[in-house]
Image (tube, helix red, strand yellow):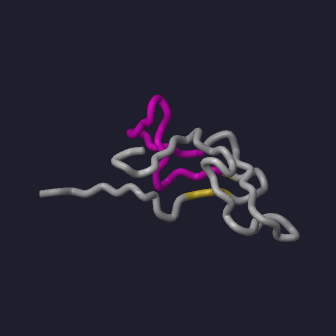
Amino acid sequence: MVSGAPAATIFDRTALVNLPSFGICKMSSPHVPCTPDPAPSFLIGSPTVRIGESPALDHLSTLPCTKGGSISFQLPGQFSVEVG
């Protein structure tokens, strides 16, 4: 948690723990319920923000699925606000 919101690192990629099912798998035929099969880590993490020793995920982070396609963020959930 960061500022009361969930946060994750490039290594938080466990199927059905850190990664939910995404409904129907678009890469399988016939289309079956999605069970993510992620690559070892996200491809891009934050160059400046760390959680422990690991880079945090940000809006550019993507995770290949070994079944095809990739997992990315449409809305990262963390926002910067300038005051003043």
Instruction: State the residue at coordinates (50%, 53%).
Output: 60
Q: Residue 26 placed where, x, y %?
A: 75, 68
Q: Is residue 41 left or right of residue 46?
A: right
User: Up-down: is 70 above or below 41?
Assistant: below
Instruction: State the residue at coordinates (55%, 41%).
Output: 10
- Report the magenta stretch's main SS: loop
Q: Residue 73 placed where, x, y %?
A: 53, 59
Q: Residue 3 placed where, x, y %?
A: 34, 47
Q: Quadrant of residue 14?
A: top right
Instruction: State the residue at coordinates (16%, 57%).
Output: 83
- Magenta-highlighted residues: 42-63
Residue occupying the far left of the picture = 84
Q: Quadrant of residue 67?
A: bottom right
Q: Is residue 60 left or right of residue 48?
A: right
How many marks do you count on the picture? 0
Instruction: State the residue at coordinates (76%, 50%).
Output: 66
Query: In terms of depth relative to the viewer, which is nearer, 17 or 44?
Result: 17
Q: Is residue 68 left or right of residue 75?
A: right
Point out the image quarter for the N terminus: top left
Is residue 7 a member of the stretch shown in magenta? Answer: no
Query: In terms of depth relative to the viewer, which is nearer, 9 or 47?
Result: 9
Is residue 47 a member of the stretch shown in magenta? Answer: yes
Residue occupying the far top of the picture = 53
Residue occupying the far right of the picture = 30
